[in-house]
Image (spheres, rainbow, N blue to C red):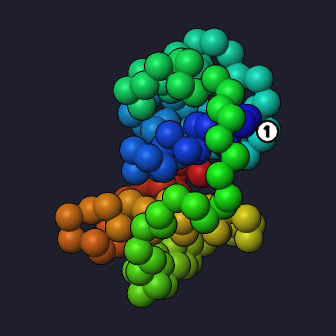
Amino acid sequence: MSIAKKLRQVMDERHISIYALERTAGMKPSVVQNIIYGRSKNPGVDTIKTIAKALNCSVAELIEETNDHLPLFAAPLEPWNLSLFVESLKALELVIKEQSLTISQKDTFSLAQEIYKYAAHSPASTVDLTFVRWLLSKK
């Protein structure tokens, strides 16, 4: 398993988004995102240590190979809240228009996913426009 896949797996297990991890680790925006999306294939040791510390796991947990080749849907999936995802997209659209931004399709889906995850794990399970604005300011 690549470091990108393993990192994404650990993040998903801990319910932490890319941007929340970067913020918690005190890293520059896009450091974790570049690893996840394969733009940084060999991140430095210090970067991995910082990420591991922020995730409260060992470096070995992030880099060691595993032999478990489970089918894609073998692990139980979180319940999907379509209404909340649509609300996430609408909030993203609102803030993009508000700030007169232009973003790519790939970034739109990535941001919508981050907003959805943040909202799904918030106590009220609602989209927070302050978070959406913060997220776009980091883009």
Q: Which residue is mark 1?
A: 39
Examine the rendered structure and indicate whether residue 29 appears above or below residue 90.
Answer: above
Of 72 and 127, which appears nearest the observer?
A: 72
Q: Position of residue 93 (x, y in %)?
A: 54, 79
Q: Is residue 107 above or below residue 8?
A: below
Q: Nearer the viewer, residue 23 or 69?
A: 69
Q: Quadrant of the N terminus?
A: top right
Please provide percent x and percent y for residue 139: 59, 51
Q: Residue at x 57, y 27 (%)?
A: 62
Left or right, 116 with reference to 124 = right
Judge left or right: residue 107 versus residue 98: right
Give the number of callouts: 1
Crowd around label 1: few <14 · some 14–19 · many ≥20 (10 Å): some
Quarter assignment of residue 42? top right
Secondary-structure class at tag 1 = loop
At 35% from the left and 72% from the top, the residue drawn is 127
Inspect this view and state whether residue 16 appears. no
Q: Which amino acid type corresponds to the residue marked 1 in the rendered image?
A: Arg
In the image, residue 87 sits, relative to residue 17, either above or below, namely below
| Residue name at image x 20 percent, y 64 percent | 123
Which residue is outermost to the left? 123
- Residue 129: x and y in percent read 36, 69
**Picture quadrant where residue 84 is located:** bottom left
Task: In this rendered view, identify the residue nearer to me: 81 or 114.
Answer: 81
Residue extending farthest to the top is: 45
Between residue 114 and residue 56, name the one nearer to us: 56
Q: Tell me residue 72's x, y (percent).
A: 66, 60
Q: Is residue 137 visible?
A: yes
Residue at x 65%, y 41% (from the top left corner)? 68
